[in-house]
Amino acid sequence: MSETNASWFERAKAVIPGGVDSPVRSFRSVGGTPYTVRSGKGAYVTDVEGAAYLDFVQSYGASLLGHAHPAVVATLREAVTLGTTFGAPTPGEVLLAEAMTSRVAGLEQVRFVSSGTEAVMSAVRLARGATGRDKIVKFDGCYHGHSDALLVAGGSGVAQLGLPGSAGVTAGAVADTIVAPYNEVPTLDERVAAVLVEPVAANMNLVAPAPGFLAALREECDRVGALLIFDEVITGFRLSLGGAEEFFAVTPDVWCFGKVIGGGLPVGAFGASRGLLSALAPEGPVYQAGTLSGNPLATAAGAAVLELVSGEDLTDLTGRVERFATGLADAVASAGLFALTPNAGPLMGLYLSREQVPAPTNFAEARELCDNGLYGPFFHAMLRQGVALAPGAYEILFTSLAHSDEDLDRTIACAGEAAQIAAKT
Ligand SMILES: *Cc1c(COP(=O)(O)O)cnc(C)c1O
């Protein structure tokens, strides 16, 4: 049997539920069969049929330098010969922790885990343990991983599949989770342990924080003694080197990281001041652990990425994304549709619409645009031209440092074509 995307996906479906290990990868909301990736290089991925796609998925933000960056590959080659996991402290975790804490003001220590989900889950436990309070506040449409208490009103795949949350989550598990609309500062009280927020909401397509929203949230947390947790799993070391704190000049109490800091390998981390983290085992009573936490391969790859990326690189990428955003919106407009392409630093959203509408400020507004039926045909028309966007309207475009200006110009040209097709549906 010759290798095709269809044959691999058939085999996948037989042995993996839905054929995917994460629902966002399925083509359920756009229709059709996913391409099965054989390899990636820079801004491109190649499928098992040998077709190359300009890739704006970039592992949903895990790969900032593009795929298989030579320096990261070399680092991993060397690291793997030394052994891959020990169950003892290693230099690599210290080096990555030093690289992170030296870039983010106020971040004094980090504890490594193996995913963003674990990072946020552990940060919430820390916040509850440190404050002795139960309630947490999250925002509608923000995604914080798939732990029970945080899936409620989640963005990303939960939104893509039109789910309110998840079956299998008990009422008890979410009883202490309060959901508020994004961009509105909730009135808190002394039962709230922490407010958890994506400083730029990037799992309901892109919703930027309104001017002053994060600062007002900071103030409200301080008023009642609640902790402010920035979920920087996407924004960390991407929005700017210092992350959302530097970008918006608002300092959280707890940070959660993932994606970029693993250089394409499984990592997460949560961090805070030394004082707050002293509540964590083995020093304090809040338990948290992991066999593969601080894994030597993952921390080596992450440290290689942070070493390679400068603040200037991110500023430069932001400028290129801003031109890309304008070009894309113009191309779509000339094809008879409207595109909103809001950006925050190098993060960029894409909403298609038949009417000219203002950029969404919360999940309800984002959802209306994401569910208007235009994205599926647009997505497929882009894919046929060799440009891979995420197979769901709730995701953002990840432009990596490997995307060239020519790549972005070609994408703009393809978007004009794709918009004409989508307009006719
Ligand atoms: C991806 C993501 C997570 C979860 O990270 P995983 O590594 O997929 O568990 C948490 N928060 C945000 C903001 C994310 O984008």
Image (cartoon, rainbow, N blue to C red):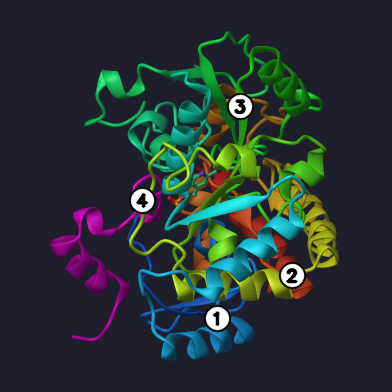
Q: Earlier in the sequence, mark 4 or mark 2?
A: 4
Q: Tag 1's secondary structure?
A: loop
Within the image, what quadrant is residue 150 found in?
top left
Which of the numbered marks, if any, corresponds to residue 309? Answer: 2
Measure the C-alpha gap from mark 4 to mark 2: 37 Å
Between label 3 and label 4, give the one nearer the viewer.
3
Which of the numbered marks, if any, corresponds to residue 124? Answer: none
The residue drawn where x is 56% and y is 42% is 277
Name the kind of residue labelled 1 in the image.
Answer: Ala
Between label 4 and label 2, give the one nearer the viewer.
2
- The image position of residue 179, as x and y in percent, is 49, 19
Measure the C-alpha gap from mark 4 to mark 1: 29 Å
Camera-nearest residue between 241 and 95: 95
Measure the C-alpha gap from mark 1 to mark 3: 38 Å
Between label 1 and label 2, give the one nearer the viewer.
2
Mark 2: give few (<14), some (14-19) or many (20+) Cα within 10 Å: some
**Residue at image mark 1:** 68
**Residue at image mark 4:** 31
The residue drawn where x is 66% and y is 28% is 360
